[in-house]
Amino acid sequence: MDFGLTDEQEMLRSSARTFLQKECPKKLARQLDESDTGYSPELWRKMSDLGWMGLPFPSKYDGGDGSFLDLVVLLDAMGYNVVPGPFFSTVVLGGLTVLAAGNEAQQMEILPGVCAGNVRLTLALTEPGARYDAASVMTTAMSRDGKYVISGTKLFVPDANVADYLLCVARTRRTGKPENGITIFLVDPKGPGVRCTLLKTLARDKQCEVVLDNVTVPRENVVGQLHQGWPVIQGVLEKARVAKCAEMVGGAQASLDMAVAYAKERVQFNRPIGSFQAIQHYCASMVSDVDGSRFITYKAAWKVSEGLPAAMDVAIAKAWTGQAYGRVTLLAHQIFGAIGFTMDHDMHLYYRRAKAADIMFGDSAAQRAVVARQLGL
Amino acid sequence: MDFRFSAEEEAFRREVREWLQREIPPRWAELDPGLWEETDESWALLRQFQRKLAQKGWLAPAYPKQYGGSEMGHIRRLILAEELYYHRAPVGIEWEISVNWVGGAVLLFGTEMQKKKYLTEVARGESSFCLGYSEPNSGSDLASIQTRAVEDGDSWVINGQKTWCSFAHYANYCWLGARTDPSAPKHRGISMFIIDMKAPGITVKPLMNILNQHSFNEVFLDDVRVPKEALVGERNSGWYQLAMALDYERSLIGTAAGNQRLIEDLIQYAKRSGTGGGGDPLTNDALAELVVENEVLRMMCYRIAWMYTKGLHPSYESSMSLLFSSQLLRQIAEVGMRLLGHYGELSQDSALAVDKARIMRTFLSCISIGVGGGTNEIQRNIVAMRGLGLPRQQ
């Protein structure tokens, strides 16, 4: 039993925090939120120089040979500082999918570019049904003349607007169980027949609608086995859920730290509001939510990292953390009062992201449904 | 990071589990007393069982050997606590009080002689403690206690009244806070004592608890004369010792395992009765939520156990865990009562009662968890002030 990080992980965390405080001020986050691309090439370059994009990938692709847990430590620090951009989409959703299922040629084509910060990826999974189950994948890929023709609408695809490759999840077989007829394809988002439209969202993250109209891709673009894509996606979703939890843990910790600092300095009735029991009790509830989220997230992350069965732990972590982050940001807002209700204040950056993160990859209720099924209910 | 138990620890868990399945007396399972439901008969069984545990070296697994412990470390203590709670073993809250709370404080502050005597007796299952903390006018404001201890030659003379003293009617000793310097600020004039409950001048009167059971007592101290050596730790620094003991009290590391058993029973009931599974999605959601919350609690408990292994003293961490635990137990009771409907109202002696009316009893006993050891509000104060360094309330 060990709740501690390794020295290397502690170093990664503190250096990431320091770097982001300097290089990714909230002002930049706000600007990028308002931009169409949602990312800064300069910051992206610096992050890749630090080896962040390559962290979880093998050194033969110029990666850092880090563990999934290392990546979670980094995402925790990124969540603390609300770093906009396609890091999550590229490294977690795209990169880990290619690593899990891609053949040597695909990995060689894509991963060194990811590690070098030259290639951006995303996973085009969800559709207008907005669910994360196999049956909701309706986009079709028909085999024709040794190629595949893909048609359908992918919705809520993060960062497709800046991606160099889409990992597009499509149905290649309609008969049998829904999970037995799904295939993953590499698709050029700028190729013919692909139309990408940016959605305006609560967290001002860059989710897109991607319409695929008879998009032709060669057979070499199949990632993994034909019809066997769903287990790959399940594995990626498991990692993505934990990774999202890690961002939430960081964000929740930041919200708590900001609110506590404010409660110590803000004076009303001739004393710091942090001396009022009502405010203290809000803060105490937040600590419990933040610490609880951290332990449950890191436990799930550790299991995933060790390659242990983690379905239950991941669902529990996402179910809890999604709600806990929301509660923390709401209480932080209450402590900030009117100033927190302004665009100039940082708090809304977290409040918005908390809700978006809860929804992403299946919300708390969906995760509890997974837990219930695991319990045989 | 590593959230695994080692192979040896897993083997230890299996050993404990098998032993408990064999050794828990059938009569105990029949009586099935919950928290705060001891009777003369169940108390006798509990004492017997504790002595058996002691023979295995499992009653005080983390104590040093010279005080009757087995130095098995805090992870094995955690495993033991989990299995004892899960199997509803005959140890009761009394085990926590004597071994972990008072024993923990004596280990930190006692003289060599005190440690030898009290820890050894406790580790062997020979003696039990009750707590002399609250008074009629000192609840949450515990530092305002008025019970007085006055030095007189070679002894201390104690006068006052204590309340909510669980199992004082059975206990051999009382771990008691008393004012030794009335002129000092309230936190700086308290000392801690261990007094023999048979000392002349002690009167124990029952208070019936919410379950209509006799667990609480009022303890009246009328010119109770105790020897000099009854003082534990430094005179007038008792508040600090008491606070440390309270930290132990608040770190109920096995509690998630007890909850787990309750939740498992509810899930079985839901499946049996057809409300779970395909029956009612709200029931499934509520039960899944209990499992989620309990895993969070489990991690809070494990974090505390891990802190012990590192030689760290859990402070606000214990308060947070207890606070969380109290809210969760109430939630379990609420979900359980909802699931059982009218059947949840039936008392233990009804033939139609489900699982000996455990949920109804939990519905009543859960009130104590958000109050005993400091109310939820006190725990929040501690998390805010000790944990976050927020300014003192005025």
Image (cartoon, grey):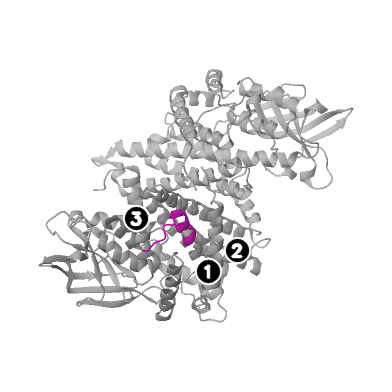
Q: Quick one: label 2 or label 3, which is nearer the N terminus?
A: 3
Image height of A299 relative to A377, above or below: above
**For residue B52, which quarter of the picture?**
bottom left
Closer to us: A218 or A266: A218
Numbered marks: total: 3
Q: Which residues are magenta?
A: B68-81
Can residue A119 be seen here? no
Under mark 1, the amino acid is Leu
Residue visible at 34% across and 36% down in the picture: A262
Query: Which residue carries the number 1 mark?
Result: B20
What SS does tag 3 mark? Answer: helix
> How would you rate the neighbour count of disc 3 (Cα within 10 Å): few for under 14, some for 14-19, many for 20 or more?
many
Under mark 2, the amino acid is Ile
Query: Which residue carries the number 3 mark?
Result: B247
x and y percent of residue B33 in the render? Answer: 46, 74
Query: Which residue carries the number 2 mark?
Result: B267
